[in-house]
Image (tube, rainbow, N blue to C red):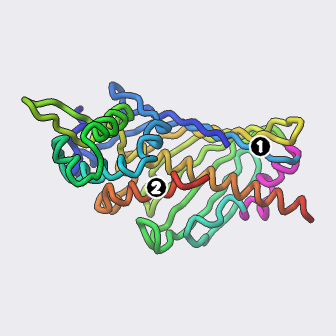
């Protein structure tokens, strides 16, 4: 399949496809693994860092922090996003929890009724002299045309705007 | 803060290094080039015209964009034509880099929350 000339030809994008992507984020926090873990285990704390901001209103947040338990967050995309008013749903299922050491969960993200990705996320808490290293590994399957037609209409201009913002981050 | 990412597209396609893509797009001239090429393919000289830089500088920028997989150039006759390389920066890859950004912002907020708790 030649994908080099498909800009402006939307039909190519409508094919069913899956793209796999893995990324790793490492952070150091100057506090104990117990405290960092608590920010994942305590719904009141988790709500504050997990689902805030992002230019959207959070309408639902439920979590059941135990192996086999699930978590659901639903946000409405704000006016500055490519899909104003559309629901962005995050559904997680906890696969493994080792207190103060590890949390593993599978999650899907949906835009409106459409699932755009399914991922396995692993969070490791490593005790260090200075505090805690958090290692986040996200192994995802991203589904076809997850952006819907609107993003394509916005085209490269929006894409580059978003990237410029991303690049401006410290 | 460290972050690394690797994207594997459908079998047979080239590997795309998001860090390299980000580096390539970190320059305003290169962003301008990509923006213009997203409208239509152009020859190097047409591409250089509205940019206030030398042809040699444009060629250098194009080399970086080509290495990152964002732009493809091809010499047909005496003219080198440049066009967007969709495989280098597909919608899915854009989503993946965006996902990473979402999680990075979350972990920033987590850091703020932990710092706040310390102050109490």
Q: Can you say whether A80 is above or below B63 in the image?
A: below
Label 2 Cα neighbours within 10 Å, binned few <14 / some 14-19 / many ≥20: some
- In this orientation, which residue lies closer to the viewer: B13 or B89? B89
Q: CA distance from mark 1 to mark 2?
A: 26 Å
Left or right of B25, for residue B47: left
Answer with mark 1 or mark 2, whichever residue precedes in sequence. 1
Residue A11 appearing in the image: no
**Does the magenta run of residues contain B107?**
no
Q: Quadrant of residue B83?
A: top left
Label 1 Cα neighbours within 10 Å, binned few <14 / some 14-19 / many ≥20: some
At 50% across and 38% down in the image, what residue appears? B19
Q: Which residue is mark 1?
A: A28
Q: Nearer the viewer, mark 1 or mark 2?
A: 2
Left or right of A26, for residue A91: left
The residue marked by circle 2 belongs to what chain?
A
- Identity of the residue furthest to the right in this view: B120
Rendered location of residue A78, percent (x, y): 50, 72
Q: Quadrant of residue A64?
A: bottom right
Disc 1 on helix, strand or loop? Answer: strand
Magenta stretch, residue numbers: A32-48
Residue A75 appearing in the image: yes
Q: Can you say whether A132 is above or below A167 in the image?
A: above
- In this orientation, which residue lies closer to the viewer: A38 or B81? B81
Rendered location of residue A43, percent (x, y): 77, 61
Q: Quadrant of residue A112?
A: bottom left
At 81% across and 38% down in the image, what residue appears? A101
At 79% across and 54% down in the image, what residue appears? A39
- In this orientation, which residue lies closer to the viewer: A117 or A28? A28
Rendered location of residue B25, percent (x, y): 42, 46
Q: Which quadrant would the N terminus of chain B be assigned to in this image?
A: top right
Left or right of B58, for residue A92: right
């Amino acid at each position: 399949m030649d994908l080099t000339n498909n800009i402006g030809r939307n039909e190519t994008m409508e094919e069913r496809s899956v793209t796999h992507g893995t990324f790793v984020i490492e952070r150091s926090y100057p506090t104990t693994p117990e405290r960092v873990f608590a920010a994942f285990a305590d719904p009141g704390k988790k709500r504050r860092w997990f689902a805030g901001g992002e230019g959207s209103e959070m309408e639902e947040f439920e979590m059941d922090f135990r192996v086999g338990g699930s978590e659901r967050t639903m946000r409405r995309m704000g006016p500055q996003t490519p899909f104003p008013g559309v629901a962005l749903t995050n559904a997680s299922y906890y696969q493994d929890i080792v207190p103060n050491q590890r949390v593993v969960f599978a999650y899907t993200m949906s835009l409106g009724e459409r699932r755009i990705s399914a991922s396995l996320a692993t969070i490791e808490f490593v005790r260090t002299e200075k505090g805690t290293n958090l290692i986040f590994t996200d192994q995802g399957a991203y589904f076809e045309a997850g952006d819907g037609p609107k993003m394509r209409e916005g085209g490269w201009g929006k894409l580059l705007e978003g990237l410029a913002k991303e690049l401006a981050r410290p | 803060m460290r972050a690394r990412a690797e994207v594997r597209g459908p079998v047979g396609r080239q590997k795309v290094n998001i860090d390299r893509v980000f580096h390539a797009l970190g320059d305003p001239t290169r962003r301008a080039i990509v923006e213009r090429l997203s409208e239509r393919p152009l020859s190097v000289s047409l591409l250089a015209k509205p940019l206030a830089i030398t042809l040699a500088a444009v060629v250098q920028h194009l080399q970086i964009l080509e290495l990152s997989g964002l732009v493809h150039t091809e010499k047909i006759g005496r003219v080198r034509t440049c066009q967007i390389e969709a495989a280098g920066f597909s919608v899915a890859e854009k989503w993946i880099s965006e996902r990473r950004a979402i999680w990075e912002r979350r972990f920033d907020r987590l850091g703020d929350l932990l710092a706040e708790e310390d102050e109490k």
